[in-house]
Amino acid sequence: MADYMLIASRDPFSTNDVPTYYALARDLKERGNTVTLFLVQNGVLPARPSAASDLLTSLSELGITVLADEFSLRERGIPANGLAPGVAAAPLDLVVDHLESGAKTLWN
């Protein structure tokens, strides 16, 4: 088993590859890996409760840690206490911690 950090910077409203990236997270988890999905930049937009956040909630229910960058949330006026179920706000420093610990990291 490996530890994966997937960083998602795109939103599903402007590009069609976001669900495919979420599916990669799901597949990695189903293969027994530890997976963290970290949303940054416009990737935090589906973290608001909406139909678009259902995919994030379902990933969380599978045991994938779904985090949204605090700074990106603030820039877009999204309150950290108003996120979809299964999504938590986190500092960007967490990415550095994962890199330092040897997690395999992908950025989309």
Image (tube, rainbow, N blue to C red):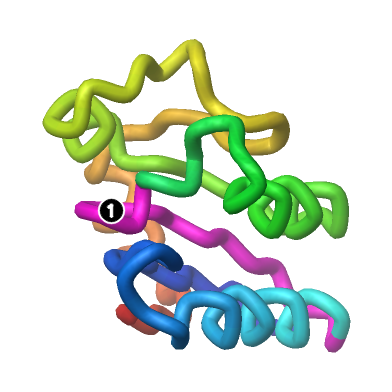
Q: Residue at x 39, y 64 (%)?
A: 13
Q: What SS does tag 1 mark?
A: loop
Q: Is residue 83 left or right of residue 99?
A: right
Q: Which residues are magenta?
A: 31-44
Per the image, is 42 magenta? Answer: yes
- The foreground one among 95 and 108 is 108
Residue type pointed to by label 1: Val
Count of picture labels? 1
Whether residue 73 appears in this view of the structure is yes
Residue at image coords 31%, 71%: 14
* Residue that appears at 58% across and 87% down: 20
Is residue 99 at all visible to an observer of this figure? no
* Residue 50 appears left or right of 5: right
Q: Is residue 33 left or right of residue 5?
A: right
How many C-alpha atoms fall within 10 Å of the one at disc 1: few (<14), some, or many (≥20)?
A: many
Please tell me which residue lies in front, 2 or 105.
105
Q: Is residue 43 above or below residue 89?
A: below
Residue 102 location, x and y as percent?
42, 75
State yes or no: residue 32 in magenta: yes
The C terminus sits in image quarter? bottom left
Task: Give the residue number, with chain letter if any, for mark 1.
Answer: 40
**Relative to the observer, which residue lies in front, 105 or 68?**
68
Q: Position of residue 30 (x, y in %)?
A: 87, 80
